[in-house]
Image (spheres, rainbow, N blue to C red):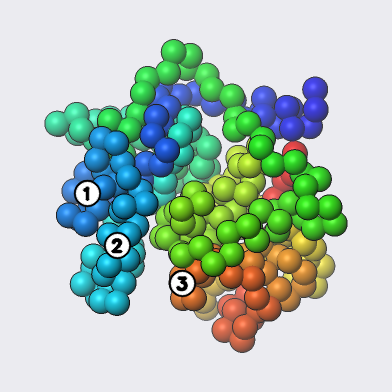
């Protein structure tokens, strides 16, 4: 068995349903979506139309109708074929609370929790689902680490809070996406990724390691993929897009740790 296949087998999980649509958004509750979020919660979601609608309010995001208004409303996203365990449904049956085992979380040992539209799920016939199928060769990119090579493919992509797909990433969503392509299940949020990763001294980082950032007295809030010491590629909410850059002064001031995720 190859190392990729072995990692895949180890990632077998219990599930009651699979995501049947290209992308479904995980909300904090059934009442979280705003009118502008209609395309995302339709029975057949149109995420591109949803993002376009959000961007019509980008110049006036204080209205709460743009991308920044997703804070406190959205937890994550799930992709087609991703397994979940439904733990309850609301009274209408239109919403399901799920845990997502391909997104590890300290909040629930079974996986990342949140609410999704029930119409976006289909029941599974087998309650055990294998881990994500690797689609990225760990040797891809030649001398470049495959995580760096994959992240660079999305440079310039607008930032999306809780995004995990090439339609839009947040910082930890980019990491989750990249390692999933390698067939590896990792934690969802930046602070949890720091706990999941093997610690690396800041002066010993290599390409493909992760930089973690936190403000004094606060937990880790940001993560970037190391290109080389002092340089990273990351989904930057403050910059609005996915960028590769040398660490600016504000990032250096909040750099608190580095880590290394497993490879297949």
Neighbours of disc 2 within 10 Å: few (<14), some (14-19), many (20+): many
**Camera-side residue: 157 or 74?**
157
Q: Which of marks 1 and 3 is nearer the N terminus?
A: 1
Name the residue beneath numbered marker 2: 54
Q: Which residue reaches farthest bottom?
A: 249
Determine the residue positioned at 82% across, 67% down: 204
Q: Residue 38 carries which label?
A: 1
- Residue 199 appears in the figure: no
Q: In which quarter of the image is the N terminus?
A: top right
- Confirm or deny contact between disc 1 and disc 3 (CB under 8 A): no
Percent position (x, y) of residue 191? 54, 59
Determine the residue positioned at 71% across, 56% down: 149
Name the residue beneath numbered marker 3: 240
Q: In which quarter of the image is the C terminus?
A: top right
Percent position (x, y) of residue 135? 66, 37
Alpha-carbon distance for marks 1 and 3? 23 Å
Percent position (x, y) of residue 110? 47, 34
Neighbours of disc 3 within 10 Å: few (<14), some (14-19), many (20+): some
As displayed, is residue 165 above or below residue 190?
A: above
Residue 162 relative to residue 223: left or right: left
Percent position (x, y) of residue 94? 20, 33
Determine the residue positioned at 21% across, 57% down: 36
């Amino acid at each position: 068995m190859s190392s990729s296949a072995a990692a895949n087998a180890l990632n077998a999980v219990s599930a009651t349903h699979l995501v049947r649509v290209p992308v479904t958004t995980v909300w904090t509750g059934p009442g979280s979506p705003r009118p502008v979020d209609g395309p995302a919660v339709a029975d057949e979601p149109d995420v591109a139309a949803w993002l376009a609608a959000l961007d019509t309010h980008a110049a006036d995001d204080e209205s709460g109708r743009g991308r920044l208004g997703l804070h406190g409303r959205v937890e994550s996203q799930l992709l087609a074929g991703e397994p979940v365990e439904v733990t309850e449904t609301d009274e209408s049956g239109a919403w399901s609370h799920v845990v997502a085992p391909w997104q590890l979380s300290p909040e629930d040992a079974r996986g990342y929790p949140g609410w999704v539209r029930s119409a976006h799920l289909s029941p599974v016939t087998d309650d055990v689902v294998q881990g994500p199928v690797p689609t990225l060769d760990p040797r891809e990119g030649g001398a470049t680490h495959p995580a760096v090579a994959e992240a660079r493919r999305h440079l310039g992509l607008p930032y999306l809070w809780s995004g995990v797909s090439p339609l839009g990433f947040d910082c930890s969503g980019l990491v989750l996406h990249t390692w999933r392509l390698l067939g590896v299940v990792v934690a969802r949020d930046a602070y949890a990724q720091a706990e999941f990763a093997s610690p690396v001294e800041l002066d010993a980082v290599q390409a493909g390691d992760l930089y973690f950032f936190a403000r004094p007295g606060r937990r880790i809030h940001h993560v970037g993929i190391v290109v080389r010491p002092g340089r990273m590629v990351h989904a930057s909410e403050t910059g609005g897009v996915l960028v590769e850059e040398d660490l600016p002064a504000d990032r250096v001031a909040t750099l608190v740790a580095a880590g290394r995720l497993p490879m297949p």
